[in-house]
Image (cartoon, rainbow, N blue to C red):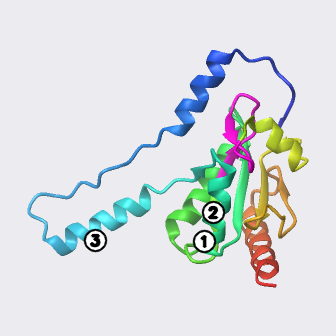
Amino acid sequence: MRFIGKQSIQFALSLLFFVSASLSTTSLAATSPGATSDSAASDSAVTDRMALKLETVIDLRVLQKQAGSSNLPVLLLLTAEECDYCEAIRSHYLEPMIRSGKYDSSLLFRQLYIDEFHYLRNHRGELVGGDQIALKYDVEVTPTILFIDASGKELADRIVGLSGADYFDRTLDTHISQAQSNFQK
């Protein structure tokens, strides 16, 4: 786990991270020569599903619109650079859940970097450091998983840290069910 503290970071470095977080990459699905259009489309769909990653929030207003228009609760991973536990949760649990397609119609998955040098737009459109969002949600340790609605209200107990890796998937499912139940009220 990583504890959040105040650090002095050069402006140029923070700007570089903000710009790099703003860029997105796309992947192109490759098909084998001689494949029929049906198998190429199927291969493309599988490749596209396997390429799905956890989307990074850089504007809370966009997250609010996405959650509102989809009418789904949000699983929000609050993460930090150089957080090995965050990477473990992302790569071993959340991204496989996204790729499975099982949660497409029931939950949005997002991540938000809460380092002070990761900038994003808050609900008022102001450019703030991720640490300001951590303060808003009273988050002191990464990884922390929040379950929120479009207004930012927490719908379930948060998950702090990565403990009990043997049963973490069950803990995650329990919290997701709690969030979905509270969301539908």
Mark 2 crowd level (few <14, some 14–19, many ≥20, 10 Å Cα): few
Q: Quadrant of residue 173?
A: bottom right
Rounded to the nearest angstrom, the CA distance separating label 3 from label 2 is: 31 Å
118 magenta-colored:
yes
> Which of pointers 3 and 2 indicates the residue nearer the eye?
2
In the picture of the structure, the residue carrying the numbered disc 1 is: 69
Q: Quadrant of residue 1?
A: top right
The amino acid type found where label 1 is placed reads Ser
* Relative depth, front residue between 40 and 14: 14
The amino acid type found where label 3 is placed reads Ser
Rounded to the nearest angstrom, the CA distance separating label 3 from label 1 is: 28 Å
Q: Is residue 64 left or right of residue 137?
A: left
Q: Are marks 1 and 2 in contact (CB under 8 Å)?
A: yes
In the picture of the structure, the residue carrying the numbered disc 2 is: 65
Residue 179 in picture, x, y percent from top left: 78, 73
The residue located at (35%, 60%) in the rendering is 47
Secondary element type, mark 3? helix
**Which range of residues does the magenta coloring cover?**
110-125
Mark 1 crowd level (few <14, some 14–19, many ≥20, 10 Å Cα): few
In the picture of the structure, the residue carrying the numbered disc 3 is: 42
Q: Quadrant of residue 92?
A: bottom right
Residue 63 in picture, x, y percent from top left: 65, 57
**Position above or below: 176 against 126:** below
Q: Is residue 56 left or right of residue 8?
A: left
Mark 3 crowd level (few <14, some 14–19, many ≥20, 10 Å Cα): few
Rounded to the nearest angstrom, the CA distance separating label 1 from label 2 is: 6 Å
Instruction: Report the disc number at residue 85.
Output: none
